Image (spheres, grey):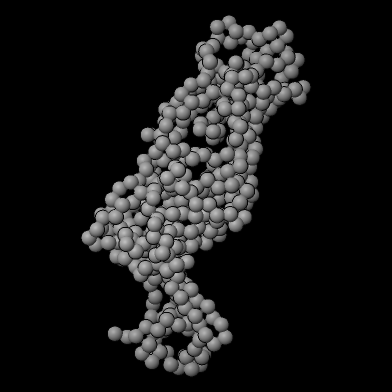
Amino acid sequence: MRKILIASVVLLGGLALAQAVQRSLNITINGASSSEKAIVVAGKSYVPVSALKSLGVNVTASNSTLALSRAGAVVTTTGAAGTQQLSGGVGVFGQAVTMGKDSPLNFTLRSLEYAVGRVAIGREVYQSTAKQKLLLMRFTVQNPQKNKDVSLSNSSFVFTTVDSSNVSVTPNWAAGDLAIARDNDSIPVSTPLKPGQRLDVFTVFIVPNDVSVPKLVVERFGDRIAGVVRYDLTGKIKGLPAPFAADSNGFKSLEEITAQIGTYYPIGLTDVRLENAAISTLEPGDVRPRESNRFVRLTFGVRNSMPKGSPTISFGMCGAKGILLELTDSDNERQTTASCGTNFLKFSRNENGDGDLTAGQETKVRYLFEIPNSASAAKLVVYDEKSIRYTFDIGTAK
């Protein structure tokens, strides 16, 4: 078998190299074709440093020395375990590493993205606020062993995020800070993996709104001595979508946005949509405004958008614990919602609009502000005590 030497082509002399090269070889890395070429010189094969780096090998050139170190165990064969992960290894997106000595699992980081809203995993609900966003992480776990089942659950791995302020946070699975579920499924994963079996799963972290997350550290739970994997996330996390992103990097969300009538926005545990703003002098049940006043009737859609199996949620307008409204009229007079939703009503009946919504359920409600006949509606802000503030232009209400 030809001996393979891991070295850099650039270390060989130009003319002498050209004369000595016997032939070139195509390169595949983890089954994928590379544009790089290997060469054969005097019966020995040489590959470019760039190919080594793509496999997670650390390469450092100093004076006349080229230092190589193995960053992590890359698994390229289904069901086969790679070389044991070294302490402080460097992880590569899309490449598996074998983690753990006594009960190893293969871990492959697939994607990360920032999000606004909420994610439910079982009975736990993780939600963003004006000060915090979500970081959704998708990864694959595989049992590399040939004759032993290995359990996969929220305690299989320990994740530590390091933000741009150099603050490290390790979610505590026992406290419900961390849970994992199958892709597109809110049911927590707690299952044995058969030999060779793999699962695509996800988890979610809550991180401060004003920082990015450039680093992730992963380790096998209870087996730190077997080594950890460090991922450089710089430029690899999908940014927040419009209209929430405050900058081009997409890691910081706005604390107040200009909202559109007819669009749902996350507020607390619900999604809320302003459907209509209208002027009214008579409501169901012969409800009329005070003399010389008229109503600004605000119609809302409220829904529980979490998946089946998620908790039933309550909604209402009871002080700081519910949905809050601020109305500004054309005289620049500002009103806020009355205590515990006095004017918060069902859509077609003059009954309190508070209620419960099961997963996937939606309802319609209304709120009545009174303004002088001489004034018109101008602006509406919808929020709760922790959420982003959504500002609507309702100056066209008639």
Q: Position of residue 376 (x, y in %)?
A: 71, 20
- Percent across and percent down for residue 273 are 55, 29
**Residue in the picture at 53% in, 15% down:** 352
Question: Where residue 70 sits in the image (x, y, percent)?
Answer: 43, 73
| Residue 192 drawn above or below residue 317 | below
Q: Is residue 233 above or below residue 8?
A: above
Residue under the point 41% across and 64% down = 225
Image quarter of residue 19: bottom left
Give 254 or 310, whichever is nearer the viewer.
Answer: 310
**Residue, x 65% and y 32% (percent of image)?**
391
| Left-right relation of 17 to 26 | right
Residue in the foreground of this view, choosing between 93 and 377? 93
Whether residue 78 is visible, yes or no, is no
**Vertical placement of residue 237 versus 271, above or below:** below
Looking at the rendered image, the quarter that the C terminus falls into is top right
Q: Which residue is the extreme one toward the left? A: 147
Q: Residue at x 60, y 35 (%)?
A: 386
Q: In the shown orientation, is residue 172 left or right of residue 214?
A: left
